[in-house]
Image (tube, grey):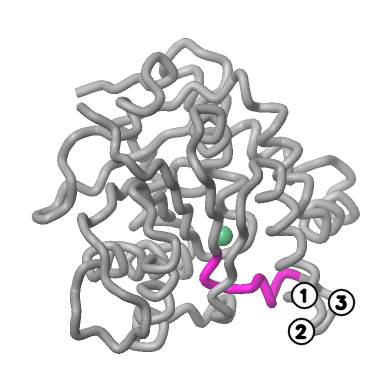
């Protein structure tokens, strides 16, 4: 397939470090191919500290998100929802739609529709709607609509399993071995989260957890590290596999 003229990817997740855990390798590969990268979080990560108040940890985590995006020459956006209280409501959908219209991505990546935490599942639904609504005129947002509806892909759930513990099988694997170092560097920008876990467990559990996930997906395609994705193929969404067209040999698909 012919690639879209505008090579722009938006990762829209629930929390500031979701992209760094689950799709930053793919974002790094896209950036190498000349794509503009945007990383967005619905919530500011305001529950991510046992010692700091909400405003203070949110400020720290917004800065960490931007530092990670900087490594890909990208931009970080926070839609200022609250951890635990990300809602599928009018206000949240409008904020996500407004962001979508400012960024005008051709490719969108969001959290898994079934995951360990409801924030991820709601972010997934909000993002689906914001994509669908990108061209709809009578929305309550100031930004102009755009077409066509972006390609939409879902990240793996955390630990690659759904709420019943079943391993989710992705349709698409992206070999991220060559950019693993960049992915680790991006994740380590989230020092507030990494240090907190390290202090509690004595090991670098934050980075280890990400690498374990990458190794699991890598094994499935006989590579060292990979990220898994599923494509949204409902009515009105693009049906071709844009990730495969954009990343070629880095992508493995299975029926
Ligand atoms: Zn998260």
Q: Secondary structure at mark 1?
A: helix
Residue extent of the magenta highlight: 41-48
Magenta-colored stretch includes residue 47:
yes
Q: Earlier in the sequence, mark 1 or mark 3?
A: 3
Say few, some or many: other residues with alpha carbon within 10 Å of mark 2 (under 14 / 14 to 19 / 20 or more). Answer: few
Say few, some or many: other residues with alpha carbon within 10 Å of mark 1 (under 14 / 14 to 19 / 20 or more). Answer: few
Q: Is residue 175 above or below residue 3?
A: above
Which quarter of the image is occupied by the N terminus?
top left
- The residue closer to the viewer here, 45 or 62, is 62
- The residue closer to the viewer here, 201 or 110, is 110
Circles 1 and 2: CB distance less than 8 Å?
Answer: yes
Q: Classify residue 143 as left or right of residue 42.
A: left
Specify the quarter for ligand 1. bottom right
Task: Tell me the number on the disc at residue 5.
Answer: none
Task: Tell me the number on the disc at residue 51.
Answer: 3
Task: Tell me the number on the disc at residue 55.
Answer: 2
Q: Residue 214 location, x and y as percent?
A: 56, 30
Residue at 58 percent of width and 79 percent of height: 80
* Mark 1 lies on residue: 59
The label nearer to you, 1 versus 3, is: 1
Residue 196 lies in what quarter of the image?
bottom right
Residue 231 lies in what quarter of the image?
top left
The answer to whether the beta carbon of the residue marked 3 is less than 8 Å from any atom of ligand 1 is: no
Residue at 39 percent of width and 65 percent of height: 100
Magenta-colored stretch includes residue 23:
no
């Amino acid at each position: 397939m012919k690639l879209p003229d505008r090579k722009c990817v938006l990762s829209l997740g629930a929390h500031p470090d979701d992209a760094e855990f689950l799709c930053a390798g793919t974002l790094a590969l896209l950036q190498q191919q000349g794509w503009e990268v945007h990383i967005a979080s619905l919530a500011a990560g305001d529950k991510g500290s046992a010692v700091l108040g909400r405003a203070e940890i949110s400020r720290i985590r917004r800065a960490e998100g931007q530092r990670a995006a900087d490594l890909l020459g990208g931009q970080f956006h926070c839609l200022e929802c609250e951890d635990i209280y990300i809602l599928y409501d009018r206000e949240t959908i409008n904020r996500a739609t407004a962001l979508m219209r400012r960024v005008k991505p051709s490719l969108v990546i969001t959290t898994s529709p079934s995951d360990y935490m409801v924030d991820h599942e709601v972010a997934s639904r909000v993002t689906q709607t914001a994509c669908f609504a990108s061209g709809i005129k009578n929305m309550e947002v100031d930004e102009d609509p755009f077409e066509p509806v972006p390609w939409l892909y879902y990240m793996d759930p955390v630990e690659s399993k759904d709420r019943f513990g079943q391993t989710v099988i992705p349709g698409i694997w992206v070999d991220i071995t060559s950019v693993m170092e960049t992915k680790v560097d991006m994740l380590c920008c989230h020092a507030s989260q990494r240090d907190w876990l390290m202090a509690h467990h004595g090991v670098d559990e934050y980075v280890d957890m990400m690498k374990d996930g990458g190794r699991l997906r890598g094994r499935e395609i006989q590579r060292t590290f990979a990220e898994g994705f599923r494509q949204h193929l409902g009515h009105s969404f693009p049906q071709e596999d844009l990730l495969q067209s954009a990343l070629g040999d880095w992508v493995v698909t299975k029926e």
